Amino acid sequence: MRRLLGLLFITTLVVLSVGMWATGHTLGQKVDPPIVIETPGDWLQAEIKVTDLSPAPRMLNAQPAADQCGKATPLNLSFANTADGSGVDTYRFTQEPTDPVLGCMFGAPANRQGYRTAWYSLTAGDTSIVTITTEGTEYDTVLAVYSGSCQNPSVLACSDDLRGFQSAVSLRVIRGQTYLIEVADYRPGVPRPPLLRFSAVMHDGGANWMQVNTLPSGGVSRHAVVAGGPNDPYIYIIGGQTTVEDSLAPRISQSLYRYDPAKNEFHKLLDIPGAGVSNTTAVYLRGKIYIPGGFDGNTSEYRNLNLVYDVASDFWDKDPIRNPPIPVELLPNEEMFAWAAAAAAPDELSYYVTGGRTSYHSIPHPSDVVIPNVYQYMPASRQWSEVQPMNSARYAHTAAWVAKGDRGLCVAGGLTTGKDGNDRDVVVLLTGGECFNPNTGGAWQPTGPLNFPRYNAGSAIGPDGNWYIFGGLDAAGGVPETEAYDPNTNTWHVLGGEYSLGGSPQDPARDWPRGVYWGDALYVFGGNTPPSENRVISSVDRMAVGAGTVPFANRVLLPLSTMSGTENFLAFSTPLLPNMPVSGNFVESTQFLNGYHFDWPAFGRVTLRLTNVSDRSILRLSVYDISKVVRAQDDSPLTGNKAVSVTLEPGRYFVTVERVVPGDMPNPNQVYQLVLDTGQ
């Protein structure tokens, strides 16, 4: 029987000062701020089909809204609990002098802060899109979402009168960030018990990912993936681990596959010689694939070979004369390493191997020997050389050559070792990255910190020149978010939840996914689920990016009302001209109000007539001024035609036709007529 090896995650992260943990770093160099973690095992078990898991619950069980921002009612929203909300009578609610001004309020409200404000808070459980609505509320609501604090809120979205007099917004949220949500009453009066109905729904993540195929040999992780060159439009999947038969030795893969993205087909190529290789890295240079060693099942030492595969001849060359491994004298303590990350130079004349660890453990361990070394290999001269070492020793990181912004060789994330405040050896999760351009010299320069620090992640350079990182682990488990490094600003940005790779109970985040861009799409192969499952994955997934830019999280989406009133049904209501009937109907089940407006030129009396109303319908006819004060209304509970007459001063006025009956699905063939009757 297979057994799962590994340790449980600790429940908290311990943040240490750099001075405590940094060992072997040059004084004055900038290093990543550390996070101490206890990491899981890396043994893999049987393949799992993630669709076999039970569906996620969807519940509305929040407590009633709070009357004050500082006591905001928390919401529970994540991929595991995708809906939340509550109802509350806001009759005794008040507004605070410090409540924010609601810039999206329509017309000329009596108070720009609204009345009887109700508050919720959301600490997002996952990165996704959240839609918030007050539909069903029995008064005129204004809805706003803020980042920041009650003392210093920054508005992200604001809505007034999106569907009738209720409000709705959709916005991107980032896992772990807190958002404040305010619902205000537009009007000061309370003609009846004001019932607020509030709901928030988190959309499922990963909408831009699609499974397009399955690996021919089943699940694989700890493998390498490279893309062919300009004349080689294929993707190559190399080695890895497929499963664990017992507690001592994983099954190492010897397989090499070529994947054709255009035809969505796999082709089996010549097996890797020997026992196979995992926990490795690879690059593609001018028709050849290079693998600088790795793990072949030998728990005493890592494999020091420079394996070379010739694509044209389907041949592996392991001759140490033609393709020498890293010279022993260049190795740290003359010991080979694994868990490194390699990147090819843009001219494809050389490649670089960064970091790694020389000690062997089945799981990351505080006693690991982690190296900052960087090596360059030149195939033409068959020469290895050491170049500028990284500021931070690291392994289980990712690397790429970032040409945009002339950044050069870049690394991000990964693990290292250090000391905690009690001088104990610990494993440290690195929060950022660093770049070094061998062509210009100088030192390694830090990138901005990752929004979600991770190790065992995959990465690829996109068609826009940005560097994308996806998957991996942190101290809490899998990291589903995809981030993009913008070389021009030296910062990492979280992409919207539709670009997250897994993260739900049905589709867990991935450890060790590997992928490359082909055209405008990112292809990811295999990996394994986080330590709670630790099962290998066989799927091939494609993320559609498109020709444009990828949206970052925390950008507001439609439908919403902006500061200028966009999507406000009164602002975009149908104009009424004197004595010229207009036709209207109700089409959707959620459509209860149709809006109209007219400009009244002089003091005088006007009549609004609603005719051709079905004898099966009850409609309510209302007239409002610019402050949404009711000036006239026919709300008799009778079917048939309606009419209101009112004396008005010059100005703009609004008319609503409200569907009272039927209350479910309307009949779109029932068409009414509305006329502004001036008596002329």
Image (cartoon, helix red, strand yellow):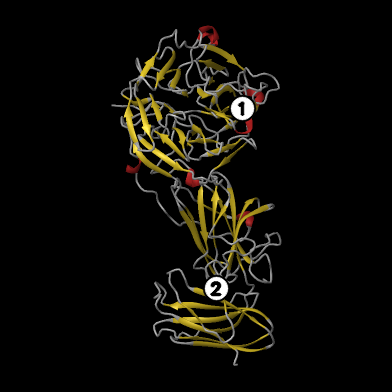
Q: Residue at x 43, y 72 (%)?
A: 587
- Can you identify the residue that label 1 sits on? 435
- Circle 1: element type: strand
The one nearer the camera, 569 or 24, is: 569
Residue 34 visible in this rendered orientation of the protein:
yes
Query: Where 356 falls versus 116 (above or below)?
Result: above
Residue 606 figure quarter = bottom right
Q: Which mark is residue 563?
A: none
Q: Residue at x 66, y 62 (%)?
A: 103
Mark 1 is surrounded, within 10 Å at the Cα level, by few (under 14), some (14 to 19) or many (20 or more) other residues, namely many
The one nearer the camera, 228 or 599, is: 228
Q: Residue at x 68, y 23 (%)?
A: 29
**Which numbered mark, 1 or 2, is in the foreground of this view?**
1
The residue positioned farthest toward the front in the image shown: 231
Q: Position of residue 492 (x, y in %)?
A: 59, 38
Report whether 283 appears left or right of 245.
right
- Can you identify the residue that label 2 sits on? 193
